[in-house]
Image (cartoon, grey):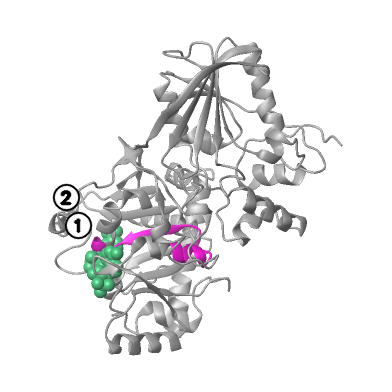
Amino acid sequence: MGKARGWQSAAAVLRRRYAQAANALNGTVPWRGVVDFVEQGLKSRGRTPLTLTYAQSLDGSIAAHTGRVLISGQASMTMTHQLRTMHDALLIGSGTLLADNPKLTARLVPGRSPLPVVLDSRLRTPPTCGLVAARESGDGDGDGRLPRLVIVTTRGGPADKWARAKALDRLGVHILEVPEELGRCSLEDTLLQLQAMGCNSVMVEGGMAVIASFLARPELVSNVVVTVSPKFLGGLGPCSELAARGSSDLLSMDQMSSCAVGSDIVIYGAAASSPVQPVNGHVNGVNGVNGVNGVNGMNRAQPVDGLPTVDLRSSCRMWIEAVESECDFKVYGTAKEGQEIVALIKGNVEGADDVPVRVHSECFTGDVLGSKRCDCGPQLRSFLDILQEEPRGVLLYIRGDEGRGIGLVDKIRAYELQEKGLDTVDANLSLGLAADLRTFDTSKEVLNQLGVRSVKLYTNNPEKVRALRPLAREVCPLKTVPNKHNVTYLRTKRDRLNHKTILSELVA
Ligand SMILES: NC(=O)c1ccc[n+]([C@@H]2O[C@H](COP(=O)([O-])OP(=O)(O)OC[C@H]3O[C@@H](n4cnc5c(N)ncnc54)[C@H](OP(=O)(O)O)[C@@H]3O)[C@@H](O)[C@H]2O)c1
């Protein structure tokens, strides 16, 4: 008991120091860029956003031969704790649990600790380890929404494994069963099941084998944060593990940046890969169709040089009244089931810079019927008006992305829930769907195929800006005139989905 108080007061001291350090830096910390970058990555749609993070020495070791060793300095450890508070779950492998007996809290900073998750195919987790004990004693910052410790294990196995599972279960540990993949826990199923439990973001902290598994599955990773300490350790790292497996097609980083944090260098970026999207947006188990919406139902875009493929299926020229011009009309197929991108092209855009572009997701109710529940119709019409004025421009109309990608049936179900008081984000979540399932990488590829050199992008959506980088050199927000039917929806898009919506006067 005295020991626990001692630990808590040490944590309180560190928390105070963190606050003082943050104040001393005028409210900023040296790792502000990392936090902002990760925050953006966590908004990625259509999969469980995942941050892969670890600390290594200059020779790539994450562990010493001689046993437990602290690799990163105090400042970068504080950064790691801050990153922990930004995620719902914190995942490690059983090797780290057995070697380090970690606490996995965010005790160095103010904020909520994530749910600890351990990959443990053989259920080797000792009932006496710190994580189980913390679960029993009620340590940590759990908010009652989630269990306090999840152990993921493979289905099947000897009877004594299930006897251990029962014992852990009695201690209040939530055991999650997933299919086996290469003799270990399937990562995809683990993420899907965590998402179904309400974990909408995951941070992976190791150790070697788990890091190696994610490096070999870049499509599951959103952010990568690697802390490099100024030491040589001559120890072991994920590379030794990957070499042993003979893995290829490993993760590479996009938008790589770095910053100095104490005596360490933190390197961070996005994983360059194609996104994974559950078919129809349903999360395995939530809508009760295991196997169909889970791993077997995964609809993966095929990456080519880091981008999903799009192929031109038909084209013609036609007079478009809304633009008062003869335009090229091209229809592209994409690797996402049911998705087509229609490119309406005015003027010659090949080799052109600063081409006005709008990427517009299909909205039958707003675009065609003029529903007042959203701002899709007015935004589409504003851009068509701009096209009328400009000598050139491109409208990319994404068919199949109705309702931020969830489809018309679920969009209308979400409307029903909004009538009961949920906002547009919570309505999707309570249907077991992501807040936004769209990704816009395919739009970038269409623009590349059209030979557009740079674009002036008309959007309020930061995800579109992100996806179209570096093509999007200028971003023009589209002004929205709210009405009494859509003002709450527009505010939610601004406040919860980070849309740069400029709301003018409310009209009837
Ligand atoms: N520097 C850092 O940032 C950092 C961070 C964390 C840990 N570490 C160090 O890393 C070392 C531990 O590394 P480790 O490789 O032994 O342990 P680990 O990666 O934490 O755990 C590996 C174990 O997890 C289980 N597992 C289940 N599903 C898996 C999957 N899909 N992919 C990979 N593993 C899966 C496997 O055991 P079963 O087959 O029994 O399920 C596997 O042996 C320790 O020395 C620790 O201090 C360093």
Give the amino acid at mark 1. Answer: Gly
Q: Are marks 2 and 1 in contact (CB under 8 Å)?
A: yes
Ligand 1 shows up in which quadrant of the image? Answer: bottom left
Instruction: Using the rendered image of the protein, determine whether residue 446 is visible from the camera's viewpoint.
Output: yes
Instruction: Using the rendered image of the protein, determine whether residue 469 is visible from the camera's viewpoint.
Output: no
Residue 503 sits above or below residue 387 on the image:
below
| Magenta residues, start to end | 192-209
Q: Earlier in the sequence, mark 2 or mark 1?
A: 2
Which quarter of the rendered picture does the C terminus lie within?
A: top right
Q: Which mark is residue 250?
A: none
Gap in Å between the C-alphas at discs 2 and 1? 9 Å
- Counting from the top left corner in percent of width and height, residue 83 is at 44, 55
Q: Which mark is residue 59?
A: 2
Total label count? 2
- Counting from the top left corner in percent of width and height, residue 356 is at 55, 19
Helix, strand or loop at mark 2: loop
Q: Quadrant of residue 346?
A: top right
Which residue corresponds to mark 1?
Answer: 237
- Counting from the top left corner in percent of width and height, residue 196 is at 51, 65
- Left or right, 483 with reference to 436: right
Helix, strand or loop at mark 1: loop
Report crowding for label 1: few under 14, some 14 to 19, many 20 or more residues within 10 A (C-alpha). many
Q: Quadrant of residue 96?
A: bottom left
Report crowding for label 2: few under 14, some 14 to 19, many 20 or more residues within 10 A (C-alpha). some
Q: Is residue 199 magenta?
A: yes
Q: Report the front residue among 111 and 501.
A: 501
Q: Report the front residue among 57 and 437.
A: 437
Give the amino acid at mark 2. Answer: Asp
User: Which of labels 2 and 1 is toward the front?
Assistant: 1
- Left or right, 77 with reference to 482: left
- Counting from the top left corner in percent of width and height, residue 504 is at 77, 32
